Amino acid sequence: TVVRIVSVLRKLVNDIIKKYGKIDEIILEGSKELNTKQEEKQIKENQKIDFKKNKEAKELLKNNNIEDYTNKKKIKKIKMLIEQNYKCLYSGKTLTIQDALDEEQCEIEQFIPRSHFWNNSQKNTILVLKKYNQNKTNTFPIDYLKQINKWEDFKEHVKNSKMQKNKKEWLTNEDKIIAIINKDTKIFRASFL
């Protein structure tokens, strides 16, 4: 596989040179080293936890007579609803299953916007009332929550949630969030990778 990757990369570089001329610098970023046994164990544990959460969400949907209870988006929303203790993290308002599934009421929010950090993982998504998310407009979540005097409430809701520790850290560590938004890659890499 490495030989194939190098071959494809060489072809790509040659095509770029043909089209644009001499290249001054090429920076390659590779994936991290192979996982240690401890990391593999953690990955398997996280997969078990996620499987259990999926099963719990499906059962809740089925028990509430929700049509198409195996729909991935519905399962994702219900997982977040349970994880967030049936609360909108921006407003603190209580959410029902029906609220969570209603596209006019709730939506899945990328906490750190994609424009600053492409991360669509579970730890970067939260379930919020649509009107609070739209009131936020293009404001960064921390700034928005501070403007409406809800940042400390948000952190408390996250702290009291059923989220995994790494997600709680991701959503509430202001220095790390600001580093990502400001693209301070040294702080980000040391903190999150």
Image (tube, rainbow, N blue to C red):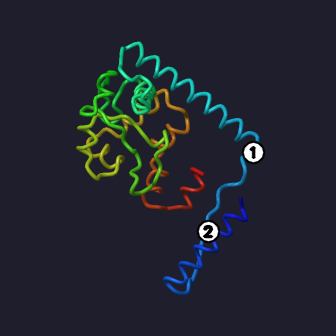
Is residue 184 placed above or below 149 in the rendered structure? Answer: below
Quadrant of the drawing holding the N terminus:
bottom right
20 to 58, vertically: above or below: below
The crowding category of the residue bearing disc 1, from other C-alpha atoms within 10 Å (few below 14, some 14 to 19, many at least 20), is: few
Label 2 and label 1: CA atoms lie apart by: 23 Å
Q: Judging from the image, what secondary structure is the residue with disc 1 in?
A: loop
Q: Nearer the viewer, residue 131 or 72?
A: 72
Q: Which mark is residue 28?
A: 2
Position of 55 relative to 187 (above/below): above
| Residue 31 drawn above or below residue 171 | below
Q: Which residue is mark 1?
A: 36
Residue 160: x %, y % from top left: 45, 27
Q: Please identify the quarter of the rendering in which residue 43 is found.
A: top right
Give x and y (percent) for residue 127: 37, 34
Q: Nearer the viewer, residue 4 or 123?
A: 4
Q: Position of residue 5 (x, y in %)?
A: 66, 64
Front position in the image: 62 or 132: 62
Position of 191 with respect to 162 (left or right) is right
